[in-house]
Image (cartoon, rainbow, N blue to C red):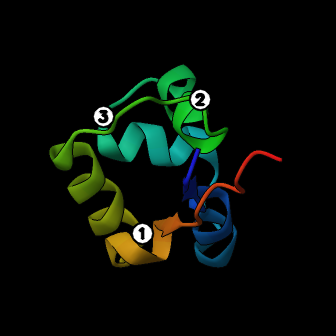
Amino acid sequence: MAIIVNLDVMMARRKISAGDLATKIGITPANLSILKNQKAKAVRFSTLNDICEALQCQPGDILEYQPDEPAK
């Protein structure tokens, strides 16, 4: 997929655990793990807003676009 989630990088920079972040933003640790591990198909803007608020960052600090390599 072309969208890369760098949530683990921001969590490390802010020194916050997955459990603590999940509690702060009101989602289950399992759902946070799905997002962190590139398994999510979508993310709600409200969740993204809560993540950015908790980590004091911008959406672009968490989400990155990398074009897929063309098939050979």
Q: Helix or strand or loop: what does disc 2 sit on?
A: loop
Dot 1 corresponds to which residue?
55
Crowd band around label 3 with a 10 angstrom C-alpha radius: few (<14), some (14–19), many (20+) = few
Q: Position of residue 26 (x, y in %)?
A: 30, 34
Kind of residue sitting beneath label 1: Leu
Q: Is residue 72 above or below residue 35?
A: below
Q: Is residue 62 left or right of residue 48?
A: right
Label 1 vs label 2, nearer the camera: 2
Q: Which mark is residue 39?
A: 2
Kind of residue sitting beneath label 3: Gly
- Residue 1: which quarter of the image? top right
Q: Earlier in the sequence, mark 2 or mark 3?
A: 3
C-alpha distance separating marks 1 and 2: 21 Å
Q: Is residue 23 left or right of residue 14?
A: left
- Residue 33: which quarter of the image? top right
The residue positioned 48% from the left and 66% from the top of the image is: 62
